[in-house]
Amino acid sequence: MLKDKLNLVPELPGCYLMHNKKDEIIYVGKAKKLKRRLSSYFNREHTGKTKKLVSEITDFEYIVTSSEKEALVLELNLIKKYDPKYNILLRDDKTYPYIELTKEKYPRLLVVRNINLKKHKHKRIYGPYPNVYAARKTVNLLNRIYPLRKCANLPKEVCLYYHIHECLGYCEKSIPQETVDNLVNEIIDFLNGNYDNVLNKIREEMINASENLNYEKAKELKELIDYINITLVKQKVDLHDNIDRDIFGYYVDKGYISFQVFFLRGGKLVERDSHIRPIVGEETEEVEEFVSRFYEKDNIKPKEILIPIVLEKEKEILSSVLDINVIIPKKGEKKKLLDMATNNAKISLEKNFELIQRNEDRTILANEELGRILNIESLNRIEIFDNSNIFGSFNVSGMIVFENGKPNKNEYRKFNITDQKNDDFHTMKEVIYRRYFRLLKEHKSMPDLIIVDGGKSQITAANEVMNDLNLKIPICGLVKNNKHRTSDLMDQNYNIINIDRKGNVFHLLTRMQDEVHNYTINYHRQIRSKGSLESVLDNIPGIGPRRKKALIKKYGSLKKIKELDITELESILPKETAKNLYNFLQDYK
């Protein structure tokens, strides 16, 4: 059938969408010649992830476009719309943290991630940084050296930062604008990669500490100097043109593609980051998709990017779609930079390959093996449920989601159970019904497998709801031993499934059970804490519904209110009411 359909595909540019047996779109690609590209999937042998993709394809559709540029734009939009399994497989789509020096009267240094790309040109934004730790470390370093404002809102009087000389006391003191401007200019200089002023300041402070026999502080300052020299002053190339540019190098081996991205800011190499993922499409397609999607997640575009020669034919299209100057360097310093990025991509893949393989064995391959054990042809999404009702109070449930062997925390859900009885059977019925009736009502995709944290009783509850809703979703139960550890997997017919206790599948199931248990018990603690607080406040004369609501909103837990002294309580409550609450809490266990 597919081969007959291939005969009708034109040799024109466009996008194609691959479907599985559930009619879900599992891969989106683009091609200069649709017929040739689609034929390559079905008329040749494949390995790795491409082989797995082809094995799941039951149908395809295509959209013809008037140009290759239009095909690239359409591909990006289709991937955003459908989020296909094989387009996002092992891809992190990072949003990089940046450092912002605010343009307030008294500026602050902030680590920001979700940037409004339309307004960022009107802000002082520096980066990107490969991880939030590096950004925070730099902010902490600058805040220690330069006495900037630290508070989001100016308090009425100076705080601890003023007394330890890390703030000029902007809330009380009159600070000359010239002083503030000097601080700002030196910080901007540092964030642009010129570290001399900061190093000189630290050296001077270190010498003073040493001369005053404060050797502990001198040692600490020496470590700061080492941090700047080793971690920050690391650029090997300075193009001396003050142009912001990103350089994309890549390397392919053993079914994986490794990318290394160099960030040049102010002409200097200041940061780099790596990405490794399995290859699904052709090499050129993978590189083009990576570069074209790199700036989707609020990552600020530089003025120029350097790309490898493999994208020579795609250069003009990328430049037009990204609205960036795109260069393929063939000699000189820029070519050296590109070669350096490529070499680093190779080193990163070689260094991390065993770790990546081990991780895939524990996640994706273990998930596929679980599918074979349960006779589920395509096991992608698993939803796992657990209940928590310690001593029969504050009855709650939690649901977590694993996709291709990895947790998808954006899909986790909490359920506050309406029937507050210590009854796991009816609790499970309620939560399963609420979850899947809603999915039916909203016409959303169902999971490939449901796992309940429990044995026969929990499975029976889930089976009854599935029958009532006329849904055919496989159900399993995770049975624990007397030590409350994962012991067995039970199918929906109450048969124990034999699984190697030392194998990756068993360890995957254990991770799922631990994850759903921890998620649910944490939610239970939150609810119980708020419930205890409400019940305590109900016993205090002078605290009505409005004050109770305000206290719960401000402090959130009984523990935090118990930490307040009588003076603090009197600042938010009438004196007599504060005294009643304080005395009650002293006797409350």
Image: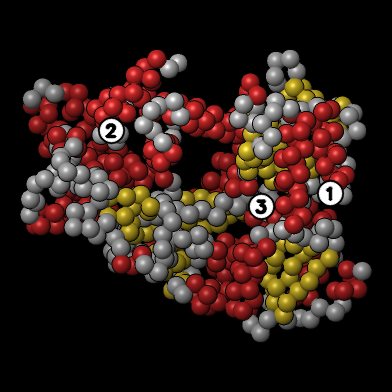
| Circle 3 Cα neighbour tier, 10 Å, few/some/many (<14 / 14–19 / ≥20) | some
Residue at which label 3 appears: 89
N-terminal-most mark, 1 or 2: 1
Q: Which mark is residue 574?
A: 2
Q: Position of residue 343 (x, y in %)?
A: 51, 52
Name the residue furthest bottom.
Answer: 66
Q: Which mark is residue 469?
A: 1
- Closer to the eye: label 2 or 3: 2
The reply, left or right, for residue 256 in relation to residue 462 is left
Q: Position of residue 230 (x, y in %)?
A: 32, 40
Q: Secondary structure at mark 2?
A: loop
Amino acid type assigned to the residue bearing label 3 in the image:
Leu
Amino acid type assigned to the residue bearing label 1 in the image:
Leu
Distance between mark 3 and mark 1 Cα atoms = 32 Å
- Closer to the eye: label 1 or 2: 2
Q: Quadrant of residue 528?
A: top right
N-terminal-most mark, 2 or 3: 3
